[in-house]
Image (tube, helix red, strand yellow):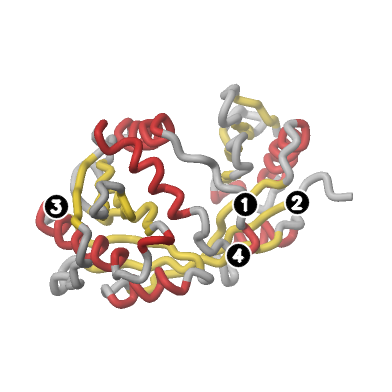
Amino acid sequence: MTITALTNPRRPAWLATGPDGRPLGVASLWNDTGDLDINVHPAERRAGVGTRLLRAVTEVAVEQGLPHVRTDAVAQGSAAEAFCLARGFRAVLRLTYTRLALDGARATAAAAPGYRLIHWDGTVPGELAETFARSRKAMDDMPMGEAAATPEPWTVERLHYVAGVVAERGDILCTTAAVAADGEIAGFTELVVPGDGAGDAQHYGTGVLPEHRDHGLARWMKAEQINRTRDRFPRLGGLLADTADDNAVMRRVNESLGYRPTHRSALFQLDLNRP
């Protein structure tokens, strides 16, 4: 087996190949977060491919001074969970995945007095960019179990980068935001729709700034987004969301809107450089 490093300054990757040159598996690492992905061809599993790839990743992570690496795995008895636990990972965050079927009744929610909703696709309009960047702090105190970390500041440049990544892969980033009386964005919710408008769309972030909470903004924004999405993309089958088990508020909002559990997963963390 040969492990070949693939050069990428922000996201280094590794390819495992057999003696005959056939690919066996791949791994990648986000340098800034320590997020790890390992994928091994089903026919090549249980032969040490994942272990060799993990060793290559962790060697680089240690050299870069990363405190840990993390990866997602389906919980409750999956092969990926067993792989992680056998190699010293521990579960630091439990997630429940839910789906809202779009063939049901329209979503309902009371409007919040003193606020208005706005919507856009793709990159945030220029006149809203600064206030939207400020509103992203609404996610800073989101319950994240043991996975909580120092939030990465949001800038206009980072907003543009994220929107660009979604656009480059051909998907549509749809944002609904609540604007307060002073013109500042008080909260937002995001949804990524497949470029062909079919299948299931995926929720990204939803957040309300602390000083604007307890007005029903999260439910109102999500209900409006659900109804707009149903009208705009009639071939969509459903909306997908994943929520930390510790995030009781968002779980209640989603459940009240008709989202139903599909499966559970966990974020597994391998601590590096431990004394």
In the displayed structure, would residue 35 be above or below residue 13?
A: below
- Image coordinates for residue 43, horizontal then vertical, percent: 56, 49
Q: Which of the image's four quarters has the N terminus?
A: top right
* Circles 4, 3 touching at the beta carbon (< 8 Å): no
Disc 1/disc 4 C-alpha distance (Å):
10 Å
Q: Which residue is mark 2?
A: 271
- Looking at the picture, tell me which residue is in the foreground, 67 or 240: 67
**From where the camera sits, is residue 24 visible?**
no
Disc 2/disc 4 C-alpha distance (Å):
16 Å
Residue in the image at 20% along x and 72% along y: 109
- Badge 4 or badge 3: first in the primary sequence: 4
Question: Mark 1 Cα within 10 Å, few/some/many (few <14, many 20+)?
Answer: few
Q: Which residue is mark 3?
A: 233
In the displayed structure, would residue 128 be above or below residue 87?
A: above
Residue in the image at 78% along x and 46% along y: 272
Q: Which residue is mark 1?
A: 149
- Badge 1 or badge 3: first in the primary sequence: 1
- Badge 2 or badge 1: first in the primary sequence: 1
- Image coordinates for residue 20, horizontal then vertical, percent: 62, 29
Mark linked to residue 145: 4
- Image coordinates for residue 4, horizontal then vertical, percent: 65, 27
Residue in the image at 15% along x and 62% along y: 227
Disc 2/disc 1 C-alpha distance (Å):
14 Å
Residue at the farthest front position:
182
Please, what secondary structure does the residue beneath circle 2 have?
Answer: strand
**From where the camera sits, is residue 123 visible?**
yes
Q: Nearer the viewer, mark 2 or mark 1?
A: 1
Please, what secondary structure does the residue beneath circle 3 have?
Answer: loop
